[in-house]
Image: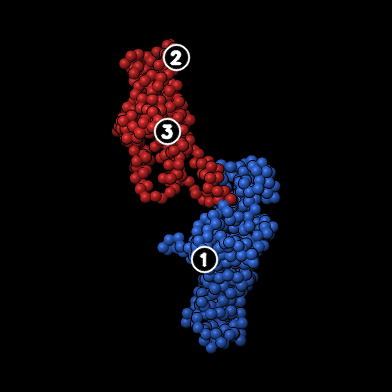
Amino acid sequence: MVAPDMTGLQAQFSLKRDADYSLALDLSIEPGQTLALLGPNGAGKTTAIAAIAGLLAIDTGQISLSGEILDDPDRDIFVAPEMRHIGVVFQDYLLFPHMTVAANVAFGMEGNGYDRAGARQKAASYLSAVGLDEMARMKPAELSGGQRQRVALARALAAEPALLLLDEPLSAIDVTTRASLRRDLSDYLSQFPGPRLLVTHEPSEAFLLADEIVILEDGNVTQAGSADDIRLAPKTDYAADVAGSNLLRGFARDGRVEVGGHVLVIPEADVSGEVLVSFHPSAVAVHTSRPEGSPRNTWATQIERIERHRERARLRLVTPLPLTAEVTTAAVEGLGLDVGSQVWVSVKATELRVEAAV
Amino acid sequence: MSSRARQRSPLVLIILGSIGVVFFVMPFIGLLGRTPWRDLASLLGEEIVLDALTLSVVTSLAATLISALLGVPLAWLLARVEFPGRTLVRGVVLTPLVLPPVVGGAALLFALGRRGLLGEPLFDATGLVLPFSTWGVILATTFVAMPFLVITVEGALRNMDRRYEGAAATLGAGRWKVFWRVTIPMISPSLLSGLLLAWARAFGEFGATITFAGNLQGRTQTLPLAVFVSLESDRDVAIAISLLMVAVSLLVLVAMRDRWWRPT
């Protein structure tokens, strides 16, 4: 069934794996666009990939690619995975251990317009595209993690898929080589003309590789948007955590929000009811004494933890509100800050983003 | 307690274990001690030996082939398809592992004998008589040998990481291609092991064969049957054949050393 006006991937579906676990997903990806499905382990990301690839059937909803319906239980449509033209780079790559690297890459081309010899020849060109021509005759077990990842990518691309799915493509990679492999991956992704879906639990991968991010928690989409949207206005603790933002849930009335017994002044006077207040850690100013002029959102607190990243330091403050403040390490030294230090903090009302909690 | 004291094994276990070793080694020493080494070549060249050897090789290979042809699909069904009565089917298939072979042979006779449940209509329709024929030997040995292949391959199919098959499907491979290019190669060590086990069992089969197929030289008299007959008539021939079969068994063991007796 074809609806010619639709392009890219549309996936709006739910599926139940067992009594405790179900997944509901709603996303669409245009050709040439990379969408990251970001979520903690166990959120259902791999299940989402399996459903889109056709390795699992959905219970309700619809999945379509380039206008063709792939799975729609209401219309009794289910296209088998081998007919979907969806390339998958699996989390642990799943390279066929009994085949050479070249045979792995050629596997998807045989019977797809190529004979065995033609497939081998084309495989060689895909392998050289990822810089692995010399490994063609080796078995996957002889390769490093990074090489395996590139073989998996070459194998998926060689089958000339209409959609590319990548399940945690960098998680099996050594931390020291991850940055360079991420750069390579970004290049390969940009050369692939179709929609690309990247599944990851690593926020930095999502922010660096994707045009759009969908956050998945406990089988549900909790937020979708650009990296900036999520960084500036995270909707859940997890999103705030991955974006590095502070997120407080409170009750708003008359330009004030009450959060756990503490009152914050907010710029919008017309918001009321349950709200989420978010602000970046760098919006929190830290003083050793009560600041002059006393901005309205000022209170005394204690430093519970200090984390240093290069020239920045993040301070964890607990009472009366759980917050993260970001200052320069020079300020930490200059002000003599340490764990247990009593400090004053202030946040400008204009730095606070407030939105209704859903 | 000192570490030396803890390392010392209990004396009773050492003694009983050693008796166990002697128990296994003794028969071979007995066999080797009685072997007429000088006449061995001519003994092995006797007609009864050559007939039995040819028959054993042909029937055991045929039984292995049939076991593979039927046993692999059967193992696949048992491992991959949920159907009512699956446990029962598995039990029935594995029964020959514990059933006395003579009983298996008798059961085959009641089913496939000339007056048997299936044997009678078969004879009426085709004139084919299975008992006391070479086909009967193949049938009896397959009955006893195939469960070894089924149980080994089913285990391998269960333990295999099925995500590889999913990965193959996303690469456009249909079920047949997945089966031949991914599933079978990935279980090939177990498949090989199952084939060898089945073959070794078929090669040494005695009870079901003699019950169902009889003991006719050149037609149904395999090597184990020839040993049994020769023990009564010409002991040296029996010893020569036994030695031959020991050698073959050792070859199988050596071939499978990594899978069956990997030293730790």
Do discs 1 and 2 share a chain?
no
Chain letter of disc 1? A
Task: Count neighbours of disc 1 (C-alpha within 10 A) and say few if under 14, some if 14 to 19, many if 20 or more.
Answer: some
Is tag 3's residue or tag 2's residue first in the polypeptide sequence? 2
Q: Are marks 1 and 2 in contact (CB under 8 Å)?
A: no
> Where residue B198 is drawn, which disc sits there?
3
Q: Which residue is mark 2?
A: B45
Task: Count neighbours of disc 3 (C-alpha within 10 A) and say few if under 14, some if 14 to 19, many if 20 or more.
Answer: many
Residue nearer the viewer, A197 or A237: A197
Residue nearer the viewer, A150 or B73: B73
Q: The disc labelled 1 sits on which kind of residue? A: Gly
Q: Colour of chain B?
A: red
Q: Is residue B141 visible?
A: no
Q: Colour of chain A?
A: blue
Does dot 3 land on a helix, a strand or a loop? helix
The residue drawn where x is 33% and y is 29% is: B114
Q: Which residue is mark 1?
A: A61
Q: Is residue B70 visible?
A: yes
Q: Is residue A170 above or below residue B12?
A: below
Question: Marks 3 and 2, Cα distance to the nearest angstrom?
Answer: 27 Å
Q: The disc labelled 3 sits on which kind of residue? A: Ala
